[in-house]
Image (cartoon, rainbow, N blue to C red):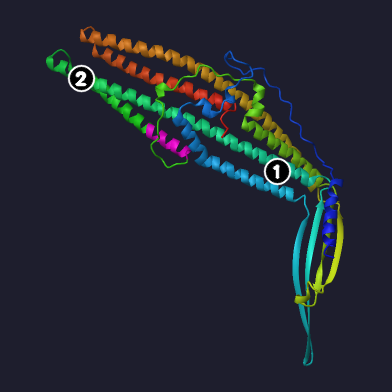
Amino acid sequence: MRHRLPSVVASLLALGPLFACNVGPNYERPQVESPASFRGPAPEPTSASTSLADRRWWELFEDETLQWLIRTALERNYDVRIAAARLLEAEAQLGLARADQLPTLNAELSADGSRSFSGSRSAGRSEFSAELKASWEIDFWGKFRRASEAARADLLATEWGRRAAAQSLVAQVASAYFNLGALDQQRAIAVGALEARRESLRLTERREQSGAGSLIDVHQARELVQLAEGESIDLTRRIEQQENLLSTLLGLDPRPITRGRPFSAQALPLAVPAGLPSALLERRPDIQAAEQQLVSANAQVGVARADQFPSLELTGSGGVASNALVALFTSPVAFLGAAGRLVQPLFDGGRRSAQVEAADARAQQAELSYRSTILQAMREVSDALVGFHRNRELAMSREGLVEASRQALTLVEARYEGGSSSYLEVLDANSRRLDAELAQVRARLDVLLSYVDVYRALGGGWEV
């Protein structure tokens, strides 16, 4: 008997290939028309298939300190770690779905005892048994195979979601780092202006004391000093808050952040090859995740349709029984049995039909979401390309503005020293120079931030 029960289970397993019918639609990627190129300025003179997103983030960002910050963030950031935990859950769900395709085998050990009484006499009876039970719902219509297909797609969607989280984190850290560098340079400009204005205040006070100047000039010079002091204090606040933001992205308590290259030494990129729009379908993790969600929803339609058909369940059991526990495996009574059950739903109030309709609707939603994700990706790339090129033009014009404001201040100061201009003109020229220098830093920052936006929008940055 010990050799017969495994053979029964093996026979059940051998029936599997005979029931390989999968109801429900097989997945086909929807046809999506992609434009020949992204909307925006004329493409860079590079190969049409070359894209900025083909470069790894550690190749794109050459600042070694920034590279270290990104690596630390990818290891410690909580959003990325949560995404990794979701991936483990999805793997377990796939294991559960696959387990439904296999038979279940349970072992059972039982004891039954009774005692009867007749007058002063009593008699006892005991029975012990050990049994193995096997059951298997044959996947005749592919219900469990479709469920496994859906779970596998969910797993892939979760993996692409993890990559999207990593991509977003790389862009966030790079942007925050460039923002921090810009704030450092702006504060340095403000501190330099403060020292120059303090010196101007001292000169104005000496002119007023010697009778060559007026008291109103002194008050106006002091106003310039106070404005520069306020600007420096505000920039210090923003720097500390930016460091707190970066610390959080790194998964660390708020703390000072190490700097690498000075902001002025960060090279402004001159070209951003975008590549072909059709490449976004394969490169962007959010598009890949949306497609896998569509695959899952499509497979769930098959699960719902399979529930409308009969289900076939096979069961088998075998074991030994004895009146004494010590003799259970030495001189037992053996038993073996098998059974089959076919269940056909006849009336359920339209529940199964409604489930199919709901699954079809969810599949339609997933397809529309997939198309919407692609459309949004096209827009993000076009916006980022426009932003980069216009910001680069603005940064170049800001350089001329700074030079003009410095020359204007020099001329006004010389005219003031010669008595040809009022100090109000010096005040105005001084403020314009400071504003121009701060605006130049912001313009350079906008170029770098839009460069990061282009890289992320094209689907780069998720490689770990």
Q: Residue tagged by mark 2?
A: 218
Examine the rendered structure and indicate whether residue 88 appears above or below residue 233: below
Instruction: Tell me, for residue 151, which label it has, or none.
Output: 1
Q: Is residue 362 visible?
A: no
Q: CA distance from mark 1 to mark 2?
A: 76 Å
In the rendered structure, are the residues bearing label 1 and label 2 in contact, judged by CB atoms less than 8 Å apart?
A: no
Q: Residue at 20% of width from left, 19% of height from top?
A: 218
Disc number lying in front (1 or 2): 1
Q: Is residue 322 left or right of residue 161?
A: right
Between 118 and 464, the one lying in front of the other is 464
Indicate the position of residue 147 as horizontal and vertical percent values: 74, 45
Give amino acid for label 2: Val
Position of the C terminus by quadrant: top right
Examine the rendered structure and indicate whether residue 295 appears above or below residue 34: below
The earlier-in-sequence mark between 1 and 2 is: 1
Q: Is residue 52 visible?
A: yes
Q: Residue at 32% of width from left, 30% of height from top?
A: 233
Q: Is residue 143 left or right of residue 384?
A: right
Q: Within 10 Å of the Cα at label 2, are there few (<14), some (14-19), or many (20+) other Cα atoms?
A: many
Q: Secondary structure at mark 2?
A: helix
Q: Residue at 23% of width from left, 6% of height from top?
A: 420
Position of the N terminus by quadrant: bottom right
Query: Which range of residues does the magenta coloring cover?
Result: 239-250
**Can you tell which quarter of the image residue 167 is in?**
top right
Indicate the position of residue 221 as horizontal and vertical percent values: 24, 20
Indicate the position of residue 259 as horizontal and vertical percent values: 40, 31
Q: Within 10 Å of the Cα at label 1, are there few (<14), some (14-19), or many (20+) other Cα atoms?
A: many
Q: Is residue 31 left or right of residue 342?
A: left
Whether 248 is among the magenta residues is yes
Q: Secondary structure at mark 1?
A: helix
Between 285 and 62, the one lying in front of the other is 62
